[in-house]
Amino acid sequence: MKITVSLKKAYEFSRVYKRGRYYAGKHVILYMLAKDSGKDLNLNKIGVTASKKVGKSVVRNRMKRLVKENYRAFEPYICLGCQMVFVVRSVSTLPTYKDINREMKYLFKRAGALDLEKWEKRSFSS
């Protein structure tokens, strides 16, 4: 993650929960605080949480890894200056990488965080 740092402190998560907006999906909820006034307008900050309701530690960590990996794929196309918290929801079956990818794309578009110019111009290398 080149232009992203992690949210680590409880007060950072609380600020995003209280001041930000949320967008719900089937597997993930996105809380987003866009362009918060401060010194870090050239960075994005993300945090990923999963409660014990999601499952045992293996399942929780797997879901967090899937979310982080999908975020890494979208990172160049996300507007700078955002603070985001991804909350993993409990589901009966474990979603795949593609399920999370599809849902995160939907959530980023709804939140207005995806830079559509860059997204349309992206190139795929094989």
Image (cartoon, grey):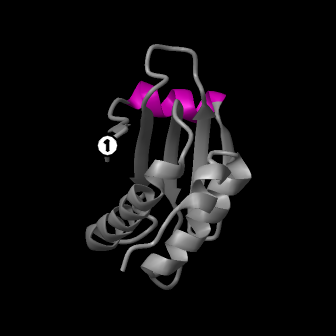
Tell which residue pokes out farthest to the left in this image. Answer: 58
At horizontal 66% and vertical 63% (from top left) the residue drawn is: 106
Q: Closest to the observer: 90 or 85? A: 85
Tell which residue pokes out farthest to the right in this image. Answer: 110
Name the secondary structure under disc 1: loop
Q: Which residues are magenta?
A: 10-19
Residue topped by disc 1: 2
At horizontal 45% and vertical 36% (from top left) the residue drawn is: 44
Q: Closest to the observer: 118 or 51? A: 118
Marks counted in the figure total 1
Q: Position of residue 45 (x, y in %)?
A: 43, 36
Q: Main secondary structure of the magenta part?
A: helix
At horizontal 35% and vertical 29% (from top left) the residue drawn is: 9
The amino acid at mark 1 is: Lys
> Which quarter of the figure has residue 46?
top left
> Which quarter of the figure has residue 67?
bottom left
Q: Closest to the observer: 91 or 120? A: 120
Q: Position of residue 35 (x, y in %)?
A: 60, 26
Quadrant in which the C terminus is drawn:
bottom left
Q: Closest to the observer: 31 or 124? A: 124
User: In this rendering, does residue 68 appear at all?
Assistant: yes
- Figure check: 123 above or below 7: below
User: In this rendering, does residue 114 appear at all?
Assistant: no
At horizontal 31% and vertical 43% (from top left) the residue drawn is: 2
Residue 9 in the magenta stretch? The answer is no
- Figure check: 111 above or below 14: below
Q: Is residue 13 left or right of residue 107?
A: left
Q: Position of residue 97 (x, y in %)?
A: 43, 77
Residue 13 in the magenta stretch? The answer is yes
